[in-house]
Structure formats: C-alpha cells, structure tokens
Image (spheres, coloured by chain):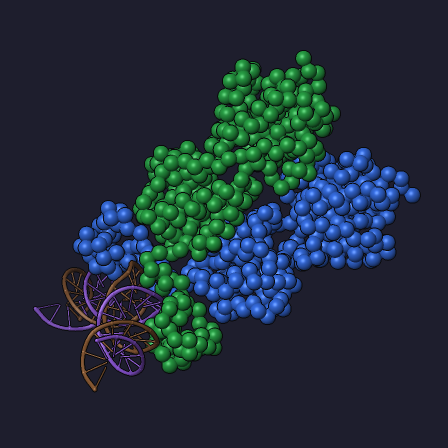
Chain colours: A green, B blue, C purple, D brown
DNA sequence: GCCGGCAATGTTTACGTAAACATGGGTGCC
DNA sequence: GGCACCCATGTTTACGTAAACATTGCCGGC
C-alpha cells in the first residue's frame, strides 16, 4: 500500500479510501491511485483487514461428508447465499464421525478465522460435554434435535414422511413398509417416527422396520427381504439412493413397480426422474435450508445474540410412476 | 492475549510461546498460562497470525457447481488432504458460467485471503484475456487444456474412453456409438475425441455423435434416438447419469441391456452398481485428483515457483452387467 | 570466588490496514 | 471583506500476534 501511495503521490490513507470505495476522494486523485494499483499489482491484504475490522466475513461449515446429495447441495446453497452477503465459506471436514475427530474439528475451529459456524452432520456426537464450542462463535446446526440449545434449521422430515404415507394409503394400500436410514441419523429417526405415527393414526398395522446406511446397495438388500413379504404392496424408503436399490431388487425378482409394489423415496435427487420406473418421492428444498442457515448465522453475527429454536423447511411430494393402487382392491 | 498474560503473571510473549507450542517454557509456567487461557476462553486470532506470518494457510477453490458427483467428490478430497497439511479450504462459488461472473469471482479472489487457488470448472471461460489472475496467487486447474500456462491435474479421460471402447470391441461389437457431454466441457471433448480415435485406429465406422448436458434426462432423450438405430449394439456414454437415462430409454422401448445393447458409462458414481442392470463404467479416482491438486498447490506455495504442465490420474474399467457380446456374432 | 555461558522470560518492533483526528485551502454568507 | 464551515487529504494510532533482540538469574569451571 505504501508503494502505491508513493507512486501515486498521495498518502497511504488515500489509497485505503480508494480501495474501500470510500467517498470523498476527488476523481482525478482516485484515477491516479487506481493506475498505481494496477501498475504494481496491488491487492489488499485480507488478514490485515480482518484484524482491523475484528471480523473475518467468513462462515465455517463443519461437515462429515460431501458424498450425500443433501450435504453437497446444502453446502452449495450456503456458499451461494453467503457470497451474496459478501461472506465466504471455509470448509472444516471431519474425516470420520468419531468423537475425537469431531472434538478435533471443533478445537481447530477455535483457531479458525470464522465469525459463525454451520454444522452439517449427525449431531448425536455433539451431545457429549467434551465438545466445547469456542465462545464468540455463532452456531447454526442442520438436521438436529438440539433446538433448545442451538439455532437449528431442518427439513420438515415428519411432514414429508406423512405426505408419502398418506399418498400410499390414499391409493388404497392397507399399510406401508419402511426402509429407514441408520439409527444415528436424526433425519432417519424423524422419518421413521412419522411413518409409524401416520400408520397408527390411520389405524393400520405397523410392519417391522428395515434399516440401511443410505446406500443403494443397502436398499437392494432390504428390497430382497421385502420381496419375501407377500403382503408388502407399498414401501416408503428413507432416501432415493436406497429406493434405487429397492427398485433393482424388485425388478430382479420379477416384482413389477408399480403394478405389484409401490415405492416412494425421499430427497428428489436429480436422477430420481430417470429411475426405472421414475420415482415418486418427497422433495427436499436444500437451497432453502442453505439460505435459512446463512440468514440465521448472519443475523447472529450482526446482533451478537445467540439464537435457539428450530426452523422447518417444507417438503413437497413429487408424483411420478413408481406408485399406483394395489393390484387387488377390496 | 494481554489478559491471559496478566492473569498468568507472565508476559504476552510467553503466552504466545505456549500457544504456538514453542519449546523453552518451563512446565510450571506453561501450566499457569494454559489455566489462564482456559479460564478466559482465549483463542488465538487467526487474522493477526496470518498478518504476522504473511500467509493464510488457506486454499481457495473456485467452482461452478457442486451438483455433479465429480465436483463434490473432488472438493471433498481436496478439503481432506488440505486439512492434513494444516490448510483450510475457502469456497468461491461462481453462480453461473458467464464471463462476467467468472471475472467477478477472480476479482474477488484478489481480495481473498488465500495462498493458492484450485479451479474446478469448464475452463473455456478462462481463455479470454479479461481474466487476470492476481499475482502471487498460485493456481492449479482441474480438467483443462491450459497445461502450457497453468498447473493442470486431470483424469486420464482419453485412456478411460479407450478402455471402454476396447472392452466393447473385444466383446465383438462392430462399432460403438457415443453419447457425449456438452461441447464446452473439456472432459466431454476429450472423451469424444478418444472414442473417435479408438474406432478409427481399429478401422471401424464412426457413427454420428449424440450430445447431452450430463443430465439423466438428456441421456434418456439420446437413448430414445439410439433405439431407432437398428445397428446400434453398443453405446459409450460420457457419464453415469446420462447412462442411467439411456438405460431407461432402452428399457422403455423393450430393448434389453445387455442382451440387445451394451452400455458403458463414465465416473463410477456410487449408484452405478445399482442401476438396472448394474452399469459397466470407467472409474475416475476423484480422491487422487484432489490429492494431487493439493500437493501441487502446496508445492507452489512452498517454493514460490509457478508450475505448469499436466498430471494425469489413471482410470479403471469396472465391469458389471450392462455389457455382453452382441446378439448375433458373425 | 569470579566470570562465561546458557536457559527462561521480558521488551521492542513490525506485519497491512482503516478509524479517528488533524490540517489546509477554498467557498458561501452576512 | 472577514469569518465560519466544509471538503479533500495527511498523520497518528491500534488491531493481535510472534520474531528478534534484551535482560535476568543460575550453574559450572578454573
């Protein structure tokens, strides 16, 4: 900056004023400074600015994996909305979901240059007292039940699951089977709970639960088991990947979807419309989740207050070709 | 830091020594300082450190979208390897692939606190002279032909495509049709070029090219066209998503895969093994691409030198059930 | 017993920036 | 015509940290 000032024949302060777009610099002077900047390839030092301002204009995102559609699409939305607000995203990957790794990530977080943190991961691991969030860092959590302690943004899992169940019951199915996600996932638990609740409310039998780890392969295995259940005419699968596996299992064993069995997924990933058959599924609005996360984070940064409470983003049932009335109505 | 020093009854410098793990602090003193730190909830200020050290220990990643499997998995690998090296990732999203947006991202980049940048996007847009990379920022580009000017890391697209073609020819197919990605994608161009080259070398007819935008829907449309080609017995599709669409088109029109037509994809996304039928595809090693990007970026940061040249990461053909010999051998 | 040396800790300074305050010259108003 | 005011610009200072240098005190060797 000093070099630019010297070359332009002004003081460093004037250079600063130009580079921050401050008013009150006469056009001729501004032009001189800009020329000098270009000539010397000057770029302001982010660290010095952050030091001066006392804020980093950065949001940290703690996540365990980007392999799931939901996580990466949420991250993308977060990055986009943060950028609009002039903020930048710093990634804090947690390589494995073990307690020390999570602790480690949060310890590192303490040294990181972030104003707020958005946590996208199974949050059971946050429960233990060993995790100490650094003071002065605001937190927003995606998909958690820690709403009393933190600011939480989540998809309305329960409503989504109910939409799926009611759609299938309305078609005339007597009950709905469920392939759930892993028990350590809040989203999976919520969907399973809503599935059970919806069936009970409708006075239907609640069939035994199958579980998978979200992967298509796990869905395939669950599907092979469901093929053996003669009265299984409708399945609600906790995500689209597993639904893909379920479809394959049924196809392989000669059960036609939707003629013999109806299948509903969850997420509405980009490929869901190209499954065989195109999958009826519950659409999650990841972009909206990301937007609300950023909003909540920045609101906390601005006010300095810590918010708690849960925000739910609505879901929408997308009807395609994997659901139909059961074969023999009664 | 001053408060901690006061509480511990030492100088600020001693606090600094403790917090950086410097040797030469007697255990008793160290313990006092640590206690004071905990008591006051002290955390070092990243901006001040960066200012002092003259480096940010941060790598910026410029990308256009996280919606593609490749991008998000590459990003994840980059974040993981960077974390191992004590570096952190900052995301610089480019909301749309128009020239101004790209320019804008690179302008912002100039003000960002990063030591190096990894660019993951269609790089045709980098060609125009309007994009000026800030001096002193080292660059690594994924998937580009700008190897003479920049440091480029890429999957060995050509080898992957050849593996696919040779596999199909070896099975006895007379030629191989191709559903390519969009022309603005280097990866798509490379795969298409290698496809054409491999057929020519083998003395086979080169059928007309179909193009899609990487989406399953585009693959479906291309598939419907290929159904009409009576001598189409083998298709090489430029990515797995489009392959999914091609499979659906064939299935819908009663063409059995692999009995009537063989299909090979590219990427080996997690779901490929659960397609109907499970997809034979070319596996890209995104983790390795990410690792090499980080390595190259950090090497440039350390040495201060700008590297050029292209590094190719090998591919592997994963055989599943979507390929078989053509129906009537001759 | 005195001095050299070394280990532990303290003091000074600089990193690059922008807010706060200071200065000077011109302009409008009475 | 003189005074007050304001606009453009310059000067000083502080943000939090760690390197470089300074100081203190202790120990061992002669």
Q: Is residue A145 above or below residue D19?
A: above
Q: Which quarter of the figure is the C terminus of chain B placed in?
A: top right
Number of numbered tags placed on the structure image = 0
Q: In this view, does B31 lie to the left or right of B218?
A: left
When asked about the image quadrant of residue A246, the answer is top right
Looking at this view, is A194 or B260 the one in front? Answer: A194
Looking at this view, is B114 or B4 the one in front? Answer: B114
Q: Residue furthest top?
A: A330
Q: Which quarter of the figure is the N terminus of chain B placed in?
A: bottom left
Q: Can residue A101 be seen in this view?
A: no
Q: In this view, does B279 lie above or below A181?
A: below
Instruction: Determine the residue positioned at 80% across, 36% down.
Output: B253
Residue A314 screen position, x and y as percent: 51, 35
Instruction: Determine the residue positioned at 52% across, 21% down.
Output: A198
Residue B33 screen position, x and y as percent: 24, 51
Residue B187 screen position, x and y as percent: 67, 56
Instruction: Determine the residue positioned at 24% across, 59% down.
Output: B12
Q: Is residue A152 left or right of residue A192?
A: left
Q: Is residue B105 above or below residue C28?
A: above
Looking at this view, is A261 or A27 the one in front? Answer: A27
Instruction: Determine the residue positioned at 42% across, 78% down.
Output: A28
Q: In this view, does A187 lie to the left or right of A107?
A: right
Q: Can residue A2 be seen in this view?
A: yes
When asked about the image quadrant of residue A173, the answer is top right
Residue B226 screen position, x and y as percent: 81, 45
């Amino acid at each position: 900056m000093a070099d630019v000032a010297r070359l332009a024949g002004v003081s460093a302060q004037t250079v600063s004023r130009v580079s921050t777009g401050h008013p009150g610099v006469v056009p001729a002077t501004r032009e001189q400074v800009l020329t000098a900047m270009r000539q010397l390839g000057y770029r302001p030092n982010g660290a010095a600015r952050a030091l001066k301002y006392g804020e980093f204009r950065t949001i940290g995102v703690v996540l365990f994996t980007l392999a799931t559609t939901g996580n990466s699409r949420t991250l993308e939305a977060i990055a986009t909305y943060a950028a609009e607000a002039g903020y930048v995203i710093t990634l804090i990957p947690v390589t494995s979901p073990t307690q020390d790794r999570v602790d480690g990530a949060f310890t590192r977080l303490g040294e990181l240059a972030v104003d707020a943190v958005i946590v996208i991961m199974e949050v059971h691991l946050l429960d233990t007292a060993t995790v100490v969030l650094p003071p002065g860092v605001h937190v927003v959590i995606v998909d958690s039940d820690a709403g009393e302690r933190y600011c939480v943004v989540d998809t309305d899992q329960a409503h989504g699951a109910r939409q799926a169940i009611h759609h299938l019951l309305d078609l005339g199915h007597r009950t709905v089977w469920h392939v759930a996600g892993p028990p350590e996932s809040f989203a999976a638990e919520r969907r399973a709970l809503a599935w059970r609740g919806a069936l009970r409310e409708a006075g239907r039998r609640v069939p035994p639960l199958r579980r998978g780890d979200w992967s298509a392969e796990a869905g395939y295995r669950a599907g092979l088991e469901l093929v053996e259940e003669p009265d299984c005419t409708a399945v609600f699968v906790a995500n689209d990947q597993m639904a893909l596996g379920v479809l394959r299992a049924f196809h392989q064993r000669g059960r036609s979807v939707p003629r013999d069995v109806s299948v509903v997924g969850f997420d509405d990933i980009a490929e869901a419309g190209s499954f065989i058959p195109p999958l009826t599924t519950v659409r999650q609005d990841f972009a909206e989740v990301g937007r609300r996360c950023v909003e909540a984070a920045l609101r906390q940064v601005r006010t300095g207050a810590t918010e708690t409470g849960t925000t739910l983003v609505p879901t929408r049932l997308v009807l395609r070709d994997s659901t139909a009335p059961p074969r023999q109505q009664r």
